[in-house]
Amino acid sequence: MAEKHASSSLGVISRKSMFCLFFLVSALFILSWFLMLRSTGSAGVIDLSLLPHPKLNSVIDNGNSASWNRNDVEASIGNRARAIPVDNEGDGGEEKPQEKDDLGDVKCNSFDNNCNQVLKVFMYDLPSEFHFGLLDWKPQGDSVWPDLRAKVPAYPGGLNLQHSIEYWLTMDLLASEIPGIPRAGSAVRVQNSSEADVIFVPFFSSISYNRYSKVNPHQKKSKNKSLEEKLVKFVTSQKEWKRSGGRDHIILAHHPNSMLYARIKLWTAMFILADFGRYSPNIANVGKDVIAPYKHVIKSYANDSSNFDSRPTLLYFQGAIYRKDGGFARQELFYALKDEKDVHFQFGSVQKDGVSKASQGMHSSKFCLNIAGDTPSSNRLFDAIASHCVPVIISDDIELPYEDVLDYSQFCIFVRTSDAVREKFLINLVRSIKKDEWTRMWQRLKEVENFFEFQYPSKEGDAVQMIWQAVARKVPAIRLKVNKFRRFSRFGTLKDGMLRKIPSPSNFW
């Protein structure tokens, strides 16, 4: 009996001990979490030696730019081990905020040392057959580039212009090396690739496709295909490509059908595109690549003094009506809207003065339809912006330029395709927008139109500068990918002269 009583007592003591131990461990666990959470409220500390390009952190991000204090950065250069607190709250000093406009975008002079830093771009000296030679320009002497001080090579007109982004960016980089050319400076060309943030591949892929994609009777392959093959061989053999696996390279393929062969071989690079409609998401996606605007082909509406009442057409569309893929809605909307009063919905093309007629029609319309066609995007959106005609976008898969810093809902109306094709839905929606709301959107269009304007020389805040800034916002992510790529390069390098093989995505198409 005594032994049984002793055993029972030990069991009670053991349970009490276990309970006390559990209580003590739980208390210590909760206390440790409390201390850790408190520590997250203190100033963030970043070792600048870990950041290859700390100045690039002052980029636009949704109108909120967490900028580096330049004085802190410069003071740290001589002592890279010094950690700089980036949270200045409570330090007794006030940092002057960047100037912002009412769109929420940071106004930033690229030459202002206290603002965004210039993007450094290394550009390959590709033979002229890849760029200006496609425009019938003939090289003079040993240079593969035209002398912009003497004559600027012209780009073909008509619909070719809408995909001319490669031309404008290349011209801007060349101009950055010529003193005396007045231009904005979001990007500059550097001659040492090790100093560059990105590597630029100057292939005019859109005009190459437009002019040379057909196979002539005496050819086994098109000139465009041959150029793409030569481009892949050249680029992948360069030390810059091998050093990063191509992750810091910029490839331009604005025409949806351009780079059909090369895109599969160069998929690790950053593409500058019109949309992702004809790309596998493993080849191109919004996280890796940049969407650039089309160049509008209609005339800009200079000195626009129109108003709601002076634009007689309520809703305007002129273009191809019967389209494949996602463009089925055009046909549905044509039959739904063709008999509505004050609605212009007709077939049209660039032939027979079509551009001039479209300019007149958009300039006299309140709303302009932008409906998905063979691809999610079209030049019609940017023609509407240049006309100050409020865009009505019916394209569920569209991606828009600079949307990480620009709120399109302030000057565009978005309608889901499933709603747009419902009976009377679209026309009732448009008629419900009254004069005051339309006027606010019209005014906003005039404020943002310069973001979509291509010109040479480039000017502050135009399309060329906005594209460079969009690239700059990708640089931190590029650095991360490149550094991860290099983890084992020291011990797993290929032999000299061997091309690094870039595997295609495992689930590509």
Image (tube, rainbow, N blue to C red):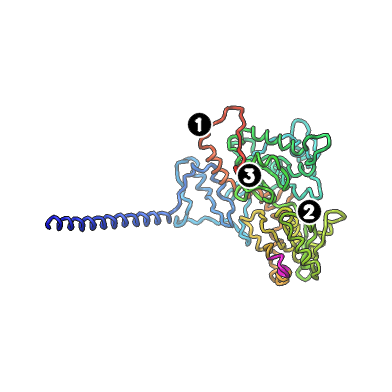
Answer with left or right where residue 151 lies relative to residue 13: right
Q: Amino acid at mark 1?
A: Phe
**Residue 98 visible, this angle:** yes
Q: Amino acid at mark 2?
A: Val
According to the image, label 3 marks what residue? 508
**Residue 411 visible, this angle:** no
Q: Residue at x 47, y 54 (%)?
A: 88
Q: Residue at x 80, y 60 (%)?
A: 318
Q: Which residues are magenta?
A: 419-426
Residue 231 pos. (x, y %): 70, 36
Closer to the camera, 425 or 88?
Answer: 425
Q: Earlier in the sequence, mark 2 or mark 3?
A: 2
Q: Earlier in the sequence, mark 3 or mark 1?
A: 1
- Circle number at residue 491: 1
Q: CA distance from mark 2 to mark 3?
A: 35 Å
According to the image, label 2 marks what residue? 297
Answer with left or right where residue 16 lies relative to residue 244: left
In the displayed orientation, state which residue is furthest to the front.
1
Q: Quadrant of residue 396?
A: bottom right
Closer to the camera, 184 or 38?
Answer: 38
